[in-house]
Image (cartoon, rainbow, N blue to C red):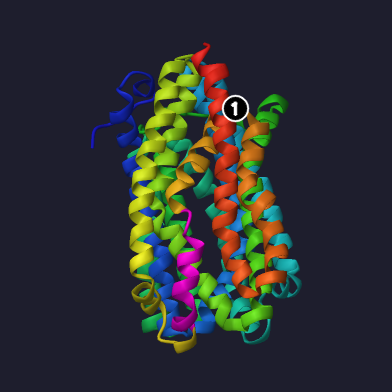
């Protein structure tokens, strides 16, 4: 695959450029998603169905702390892309240094907090009954590695902002491959059970961190910082915070959603329904990898060209990204509608789980073909530095629509109401995002 530099983001044809950016991002997300998928299959077959539920309970906490690194990475990367597009390299360097400082301070603080309140947090996130004991084992070990994951997520976004998608892809692939290898050793050979699954994940974070550190110290990176760049600057921190808060809010809502759905499903179906939700959630990460990859590839192109005031290219990349992502999302949708029983049997041979999961999977993914508009639309506002609309549109899907529906629909439809909340919220958030995106294109991009 041809090398992409920061300058290419403003020069190459949009279709070709989006492919160059999106393919490595998609491959990285695919490998990462395969890792999560196969890891869950290993855990389900080598440890048991309750182990799948236990990991699903722990995900919200570790996910949120790791999201701190992602938020700082995405917020700062938007600044870096626009700074490079405007030829302002000093600002890009200061931003990267501030990202490193912020990631260190926040991830360590929240990891310590999470370890102190372990016995409170696990039950709150649905880790009750037979799930509590394996969830606690997994949780405590995972949190040791979550700060490292925070640096990995932050660094990955900065690499992509430099126009180096292949290196960002490798940074996502390395922990995925490492985790599966460690899974086999720690769970299957050494028989460490849940502790083995947790140490496999933590070890994979460390390997990826070492790779990303090498990238920034090598000649591959254009961002060569010194100690002066680590000092926090109020203006940069404020801009990172306002843009990164969009990502953090989205990930925080994901964590809250896990908490609410786990508890709601426990009340209706106990451990079995939580296991079904864990399987559906893993498939959500896996099958949408091409859509998420296009969104990731879209962000630096939109940000760079917006900073360079090439608004016609920004408009073109919006429509191209939506078109590509919609086609791929439709293919994913068809596969899930046809083969949900086969997919469920990959994870477990538990008859109850196999009985209830396929129909719920169909419901949860019913609106996938239209999600491209929502994802690309929200990403556009973040890429160009418009934090408020980016935040609102990012939160529409889960916070504004899904969570209220989660409380309302089960009153009338029981457990079915939980599952139909997914597609209804997808449709409503897509409609809202389309309105704001269309308005932005008309008033800003076409007028300019």
Q: Identify whether 321 is placed above or below 143.
A: above
Asked if residue 419 is among those painted magenta in the image, a careful observer would answer: no
Query: Is residue 256 found left or right of 383 in the rendered image?
Result: right
Magenta span: 353-367
Q: Main secondary structure of the magenta part?
A: helix
Label 1: element kind: loop
Q: Quadrant of residue 127?
A: bottom right
- Mark count: 1
Mark 1 residue crowding within 10 angstroms, few (<14) / some (14–19) / many (20+): many
From where the camera sits, is residue 381 visible? no
Q: Nearer the viewer, residue 223 or 337?
A: 337
Q: Quadrant of residue 36?
A: bottom left
Q: Residue at x 68, y 32 (%)?
A: 388
Q: Identify whether 284 is placed above or below 349.
A: above
Locate residue 145, reporting x and y percent.
Answer: 55, 61
Locate residue 398, reporting x and y percent.
Answer: 63, 53
Locate residue 139, reporting x and y percent.
Answer: 61, 71
Locate residue 16, reporting x and y percent.
Answer: 28, 30
Quadrant where the image shows the N terminus: top left
Query: Is residue 212 found left or right of 399 in the rendered image?
Result: left
The residue beneath circle 1 is 385
Query: Is residue 3 found left or right of 171 in the rendered image?
Result: left
Q: Residue at x 39, y 41 (%)?
A: 294
Asked if residue 362 is among those painted magenta in the image, a careful observer would answer: yes
């Amino acid at each position: 695959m041809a090398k992409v530099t920061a300058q290419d983001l403003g020069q190459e044809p949009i279709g070709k450029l989006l492919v160059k950016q999106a393919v490595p991002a998609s491959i990285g997300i695919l490998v990462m998603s395969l890792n999560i998928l196969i890891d869950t299959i290993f855990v389900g077959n080598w440890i048991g169905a309750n182990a799948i539920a236990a990991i699903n309970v722990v995900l919200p906490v570790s996910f949120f702390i790791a999201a701190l690194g992602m938020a700082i990475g995405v917020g700062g990367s938007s600044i870096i892309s626009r700074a490079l597009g405007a030829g302002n390299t000093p600002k890009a360097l200061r931003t990267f240094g501030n990202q490193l400082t912020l990631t260190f301070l926040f991830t360590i603080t929240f990891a310590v907090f999470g370890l102190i309140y372990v016995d409170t947090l696990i039950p709150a996130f649905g880790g009750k009954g037979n799930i509590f004991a394996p969830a606690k084992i997994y949780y405590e070990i995972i949190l040791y590695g979550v700060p490292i994951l925070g640096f990995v997520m932050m660094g990955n976004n900065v690499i992509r902002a430099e126009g180096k998608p292949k290196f960002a892809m490798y940074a996502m692939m390395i922990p995925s491959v490492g985790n599966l290898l460690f899974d086999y050793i720690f769970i299957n050979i050494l028989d460490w059970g849940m502790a083995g699954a947790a140490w496999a994940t933590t070890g994979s974070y460390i390997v990826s961190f070492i790779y990303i550190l090498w990238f920034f110290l090598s000649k591959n990176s254009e961002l060569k910082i010194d100690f002066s760049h680590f000092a926090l600057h109020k203006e940069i921190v404020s801009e990172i915070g306002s843009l990164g808060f969009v990502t953090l809010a989205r990930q925080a809502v994901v964590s809250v959603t896990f908490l609410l759905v786990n508890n709601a499903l426990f009340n209706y179906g106990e451990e079995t329904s939580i296991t079904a939700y864990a399987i559906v959630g893993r498939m959500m990460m896996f099958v949408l990898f091409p859509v998420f990859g296009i969104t990731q590839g879209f962000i630096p192109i939109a940000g760079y060209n917006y900073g360079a005031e090439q608004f016609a290219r920004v408009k073109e990349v919006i429509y191209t990204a939506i078109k590509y992502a919609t086609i791929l999302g439709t293919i994913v949708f068809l596969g899930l509608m046809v083969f949900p029983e086969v997919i469920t049997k990959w994870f477990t041979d538990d008859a109850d789980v196999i009985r209830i999961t396929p129909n719920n999977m169909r419901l949860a993914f019913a609106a996938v073909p239209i999600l491209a508009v929502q994802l690309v639309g929200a990403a556009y506002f973040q890429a160009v530095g418009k934090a408020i609309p980016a935040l609102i549109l990012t939160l529409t899907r889960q916070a504004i629509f899904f969570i209220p529906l989660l409380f309302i629909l089960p009153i009338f439809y029981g457990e079915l109401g939980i599952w139909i909340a997914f597609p209804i919220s997808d449709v409503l958030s897509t409609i809202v995002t389309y309105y704001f995106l269309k308005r932005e294109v008309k008033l800003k991009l076409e007028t300019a």
